[in-house]
Amino acid sequence: MTARRRYDVAVVGAGPAGSAAALTLCRAGYEVCLIDRSAFPRHKLCGEFLSSESIPLLKQLSVFDRISAKGGVSIRRFALTTASGRGVTVDLPEEALGVSRFVLDDELVRGAEGAGAALLLSHEVDAIAGSVDDGFVLTARPVDATAGTSDDAVVEIEAAIVVGAWGRRSKLDRMLRPEVLQTSDWVAFKGHYTGVDVGDCIEMHAFPGGYCGMSHVEGGVLNACWILNTQTLKEGVDRAFAPNRTLAGRFAEMSAVFDRPLSVSQLRFDALSPFAGDILLVGDAAGMIAPVCGDGMSMALMSGIHLARRLEEWFNGTTTMPDIRNSYAAAWQDGFRRRMQIGRMAHRLLTSPRLANAGTRVVGLVPSLLSQTITATRGYPDSLR
């Protein structure tokens, strides 16, 4: 039997971007439904590195203290190694935080719920119809962990606005904007490990055809997240890691916590569009920064909060939707374009042994260049405040 519910805003995706948007809108007095196909808490493929600008955002959302109480780890240094054996370590411009998505996302979701959001978890949105002028209707089906989506107990949600926070390459992308689904050779994996202590450092290890980042999260667990192209994957991960002795040595000493690593394929690192028709997009749905930058979660939080504030103006009648579209697109470009360009360049550099060795040689001589590059992908842009 189909149930129908009505809200001011439906947010599809309860990661950092979607939860931040939902929480901010609820605090402003609007009725919000936050939908996700997963139950929480749950693990998610991610570098699990929160850059410094994320901390005041989490405090603003009133979840920082709870995350800290669960053991978020201070990260103060960055180390880079290559297959040539070269390496360099620098201090981060500001203190960062290591925290698992298992903890972070759950605290954000519960924060949104505490602010008044209606949660519709373990439900997948498989249809969105309508427009800003006429209103939207979303169809969501419960997800069975073993059998996929169920046709029973379908929920229809009416909303004046839909915020898309469904991350990278969703089923909804195939329906709403198939033009963004270009093929990609990049595949990523993530696992949790014990047995190695890297202290307050985030390490980045380059190898031919990819790179691997690792740093601690709560409980002393080491999160390792690696990305490589499909050809390198076909040749075998152990073989890929072997040229970088530091990386290979880390994995030889570590013990896996997960039965198998999480994985995701077809990764693209460019700004797509902050819109899918009349649906407003936040976080990775609007564009994913290359993981080498470690800035994806702060961008998600910033875009979610910024869009929520603009929507408050629309609900209050102080602006129009065309104005919001124009200002939001401009804010995205002004705030994130440069750091995403730097991310793509860094990604190309680390995945090429020749470029990685040359780059590491240069920053070994002038470490401030690496610090300046890190700083260039940080900060809270004025356009998104």
Image (tube, rainbow, N blue to C red):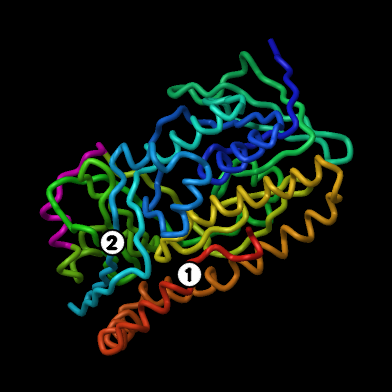
Q: Which mark is residue 297?
A: none
Q: How many marks?
A: 2
Is residue 333 covered in magenta? no
* 187 versus 4 height, above or below: below
The answer to whether residue 235 is left or right of residue 292 is: left
Extreme-right residue of the structure: 133
Could you tell me residue 112's position as x and y percent? 55, 33
Q: Quadrant of residue 172?
A: top right
Is residue 258 covered in magenta? yes
Mark 2 → mark 1, Cα distance in angstroms = 16 Å
The answer to whether residue 19 is left or right of residue 106 is: right
Q: SS for tag 1?
A: loop
Quadrant of the image for the C terminus? bottom right
Q: Return the residue at label 2.
A: 202
The answer to whether residue 158 is left or right of residue 249 is: right
Q: Return the residue at label 1.
A: 377
Q: Quadrant of residue 114?
A: top right
> Which amino acid lies under the numbered mark 1 shown in the image of this protein?
Thr
> Which amino acid lies under the numbered mark 2 shown in the image of this protein?
Ile
Give the magenta part as a residue range: 248-259
Local crowd size for mark 1, using a 10 Å CA cut-off: few (<14), some (14–19), many (≥20): many
Could you tell me residue 268's position as x and y percent? 53, 61
Q: SS for tag 2?
A: strand
Q: Residue at x 70, y 28 (%)?
A: 31
The answer to whether residue 166 is left or right of residue 50 is: right
Q: Residue at x 85, y 48 (%)?
A: 318
Q: Nearer the viewer, residue 18 or 358?
A: 18
Could you tell me residue 213's position as x and y percent? 31, 60
